[in-house]
Image (spheres, rainbow, N blue to C red):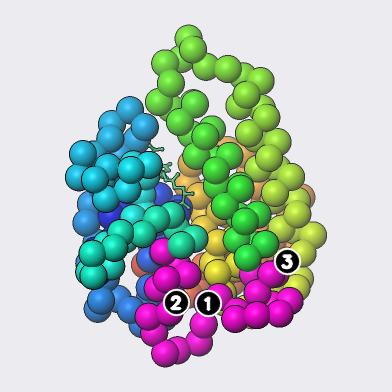
């Protein structure tokens, strides 16, 4: 399988962590696709018409996107502990946590593009504030429920860890740990996992 990938992407990181946690590393080859909305890649666009990473060519003629679909597909490709609980409350809890973390990430990536890619004179402070509000409320919600995470390693907690890692990577000055001590402690412990260590986004 071929994963269109770039190390700074937190959505790619979700997939890479799931691959490592489920023992699929030997079956997934990474292809560099460093893109932005203003610097697309024709070969990626052929694979994913939306032009975003991650995308996964499964090797049988199908290309999957986005990270949620790729992760759920890969979870069917191994015999170990499942990262997507099959049913019941555990499933909806994990999917909801993934949606919460992905929402933080969408707002984070929107903010990154607005403050980094968009020409300075065209930036829109109110819009940035709106995105930052989504991030703040999302992190507050994670703090409120983090005690229920326990030792769980599934798509919900992997996504939460990727969201917090992205805030550290792109917005270190925002100090998300302030006012979120339980979440900070959980993140520190979860970050010790080899899959987390191996996927820390590169500086720069
Ligand atoms: O929007 C674009 O054209 C290119 N952006 C992306 O491909 C980003 C890279 S994160 N990927 C997504 O937004 C994927 C979201 C999708 N819902 C999923 O896969 O779950 C780059 C962040 C950074 O460099 O700071």
Mark 3 lies on residue: 146
Establish if 10 lies above or below 39: below
Question: Furthest residue to the top?
Answer: 121
Give yes or no for contact between labels 2 and 1 (Cβ–Cβ under 8 Å): yes
Q: What element carries label 1?
A: loop
Q: In which quarter of the image is residue 137?
A: top right
Image quadrant occupied by the N terminus: bottom left
Q: Reply above or below: 161 against 173.
A: below
Question: In the shown orientation, is residue 92 left or right of residue 28?
Answer: right
Mark toward the start of the polypeptide (1 vs 3): 1
Q: Tell me the SS state at disc 2.
A: loop
Residue 175 found in image quarter: top right
| Magenta-span inclusion, residue 73 | yes
Q: Where is residue 13 in the image (x, y as percent from the top left)?
A: 42, 59
Q: Residue placed at 23% from the left, 52% from the top?
A: 32
Q: Residue at x 69, y 51 (%)?
A: 139
Q: What stretch is highlighted in magenta?
A: 70-94
Residue placed furthest toward the bottom: 79
Q: Which residue is drawn at 36% across and 32% down?
A: 37
In the displayed structure, would residue 153 be above or below residue 186?
below
Question: Which residue in the structure is indicated by mark 2?
Answer: 75
């Amino acid at each position: 399988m071929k994963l269109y990938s770039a190390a700074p992407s937190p959505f790619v990181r979700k997939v890479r962590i799931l691959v490592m946690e489920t023992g699929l590393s030997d079956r997934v080859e990474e292809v560099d696709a460093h893109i932005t909305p203003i610097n697309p890649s024709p070969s990626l666009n052929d694979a994913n018409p939306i032009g975003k990473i991650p995308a996964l060519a499964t090797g049988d003629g199908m290309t999957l996107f986005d990270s949620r679909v790729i992760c759920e597909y890969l979870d069917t490709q191994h015999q170990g502990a499942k990262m997507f609980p099959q049913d019941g409350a555990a499933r909806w809890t994990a999917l909801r946590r993934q949606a919460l973390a992905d929402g933080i990430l969408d707002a984070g990536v929107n903010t990154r593009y607005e403050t980094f890619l968009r020409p300075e004179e065209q930036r829109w402070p109110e819009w940035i504030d709106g995105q930052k509000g989504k991030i703040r409320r999302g992190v507050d919600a994670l703090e409120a429920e983090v005690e229920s995470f326990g030792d769980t390693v599934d798509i919900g907690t992997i996504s939460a860890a990727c969201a917090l890692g992205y805030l550290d990577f792109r917005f270190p000055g925002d100090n998300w740990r302030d006012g979120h001590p339980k979440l900070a402690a959980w993140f520190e412990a979860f970050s010790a996992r080899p899959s987390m260590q191996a996927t820390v986004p590169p500086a720069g």
